[in-house]
Amino acid sequence: MLALGSLTLALLAISCGQAGTKAPDSEGLSRTDDQREVTVKVTWNGRGDPPAFEVVLDTHSVDLDSYDLGLTSVLKTGRGQELAPTGWDAEKGGHHRSGNLLFGSLDQKELSGDHLELVIKDINGVPERSFHWDSD
C-alpha cells in the first residue's frame, strides 16, 4: 500500500511539472512556459511601439527549426484588438532558437488600463501557450 501511495505522489509530481509554468521575471516583462520538453521564454519590450517580444525556444529533444512563430502567433489586447506578427527574425538553431517577434503599431489607447496576451500555437503538441502582461 505504501508503494502505491508513493507511486501516486510521483505521478502527480510529474504531471504537475508537465502542466507548464508561467512565471514573471523580477522585472515583470518576461514569462516562461515549460511544456512537453520545450521551454518558451518571452520578454515584452514594454510600452515600445511597435510591440516586440524577444522569444527564446529551448529543448534537448525537439528540432525547433520548423516552427515559424510569424505564422502561429497572435497578440491580443484587453479591448479585443488582435494583431498578427509582422515578422519573426529567428535564425535556425536546432534545439535552441531565439529571435524577435514583431507586430505593427498599436494604438496606445489599446494599452492603457488593460492587458496584453501573446498566444503562440502548436509547439511540440501544445495547442496554445499564452503569455499575459498588465499594460499599466
Image (tube, rainbow, N blue to C red):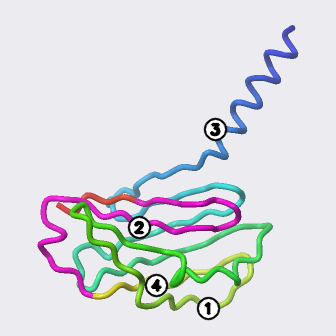
Question: What's the residue at 58%, 49% (across, down)?
Answer: 20
At which x and y percent is residue 123?
A: 64, 68
Sequence-earlier tag: 4 or 3: 3
Q: Which of label 1 and label 2 is nearer to you?
A: 2
Q: Which mark, residue 16? A: 3
Give coordinates of residue 47: x percent, y percent.
Answer: 22, 75
Residue, x 37% and y 72% (percent of image)?
A: 75
Q: Is residue 34 left or right of residue 43?
A: right
Callout in the foreground (4, 2): 2
Magenta residue check for 36: no
Distance, label 2 to label 3, CA atoms, is 23 Å
Residue indicated by mark 2: 118
Q: Residues within 10 Å of mark 3 (few under 14, many from 20)?
A: few
Q: Quadrant of residue 14?
A: top right
Q: Residue at x 40, y 58 (%)?
A: 25
Name the mark on residue 100: 4
Looking at the rendered structure, the kind of residue marked 3 is Cys
State the separation of the CA atoms marked 3 and 1: 32 Å
Which mark sits nearer the N-terminus, 4 or 1? 1
Question: How many other residues sit within 10 Å of disc 1, few (<14), some (14-19) or many (≥20)?
Answer: few
Image quadrant holding the C terminus, namely: bottom left
Residue denoted by label 1 = 91
Disc 2 on helix, strand or loop? strand
Residues marked 4 and 3 touching at CB (< 8 Å): no
